[in-house]
Amino acid sequence: MPLSRSQYDEIMHEYEQRRTRARQDAEEAKIKVREQIPEYADIEDRITDLAMECAGRVFEGDKTAVEKMKKEIGDLTLRQQELLKEHGFPADFLDEKYECSDCRDTGYTNEHTKCHCLKQAELRYMYRQSNIEEILQRENFDTLSFEYYTDSESERMKEIIEKCRRFADDFGKKYENILLYGDVGVGKTFLTNCMAKAILDKGYSVIYFTSMRLFDTLSRELFRYDENESWDVQKDIYTCDLLIIDDLGTESVNSFVASRLFDIINERDLRKKSTIISTNLSFEDIDGRYTERNFSRIFGSYTVLHPDVEDIRIRKRRSAS
Ligand SMILES: [Zn+2]
């Protein structure tokens, strides 16, 4: 995706601030050195004079002037380095120090190539954006536990988890959608988070919304004055690599919600962009609830996963008491 224009600008602004900081720090370092080592300051002024003199001689036609100046400046620079060392300053004390030396905090290694640090920054931004950064630390395929399932449930869950894992592994190679359907407390959100984390870690863009927040955001966008901004949110929802709609059915339905839901699912299907929906509604329920459009055709492309187990949150509580 990935990021919208305004999000990208925000990151670029941060880079600009880093460069400014590096420049200011270097300026301050220079002032400090000039104050503490008068000879250093003299040499620096001498170098400036030399460059001026040299320019004048070149102008008058002296072809050896540049070579001579280079030699002289080279000697003076060496002396400056010695002075720094004698006064206990590190050799790089006066350099501009960038957080990323590969791109000197520009975000790009050349005109069109993003630096690894920018790609990472975008990814972090998306984690933050998707509101699940923290949850993903706790809930991922590595932290799965079957402790609270009975044996037969555990078998069933293992199958489902295997499918989720495959979805994440094949992501980008295969177009697939998932409908996680089941009662409250069977681990739908947990499974969704596991997939989100694995797919984010592969560098894909993921947007996570609870269904309530999704429609809330979209309806707010309708009343925004900034047209570009509103386009961006909608565009990201249509084009991100993976869209997760958690808890579909908890929002209050009206014709706006029904038609937007249809548009999102339909648009993403046309673009072959994957979507994960978690819900406690069956297909029939969904068709009944969002009556205005025909959802069943679109849901043909969805893999249904149905964790049919008892509410593990209740079990956890029971075992804790
Ligand atoms: Zn960089």
Image: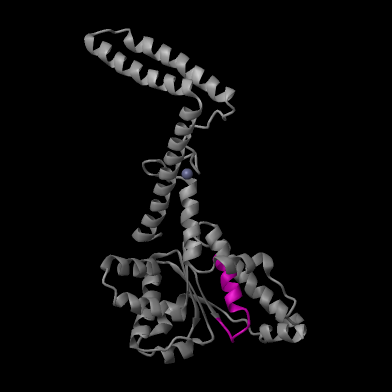
Which residue lies at the image location 45% right of the left edge and 33% below the top edge?
A: 31
Q: Can see residue 114?
A: no
Where is residue 205 shown, x and y percent of the image? 46, 61
Furthest residue in direction left, as rendered: 60
Q: Residue 234 lies in what quarter of the image?
A: bottom left
> Relative to the observer, which residue lies in front, 221 or 64?
64
Q: Relative to residue 36, is residue 258 drawn left or right?
A: left
Span highlighted in magenta in the image: 181-196
Which residue lies at the image location 61% right of the left edge and 65% below the top edge?
A: 137
Q: Residue 193 lies in what quarter of the image?
A: bottom right
Q: Where 32 sits versus 122, above or below?
A: above
Where is residue 112 shown, x and y percent of the image? 37, 44
Q: Relative to residue 148, is residue 7 drawn left or right?
A: left
Q: Where 30 sits versus 284, above or below?
A: above
Q: Is residue 130 magenta?
A: no
Which residue lies at the image location 61% right of the left edge and 66% below the top edge?
A: 165
Q: Relative to residue 134, is residue 15 drawn left or right?
A: left
Q: Where 133 sits versus 111, above or below?
A: below
Q: Can see residue 288?
A: yes
Where is residue 49 shown, x and y percent of the image? 34, 18
Furthest residue in direction bottom, as rendered: 288
Q: Is residue 190 magenta?
A: yes
Identify the image quadrant of the N terminus: bottom left
Which residue lies at the image location 67% right of the left edge and 77% below the top edge?
A: 157
Where is residue 191 shown, x and y percent of the image? 60, 73
Identify the image quadrant of the C terminus: bottom right
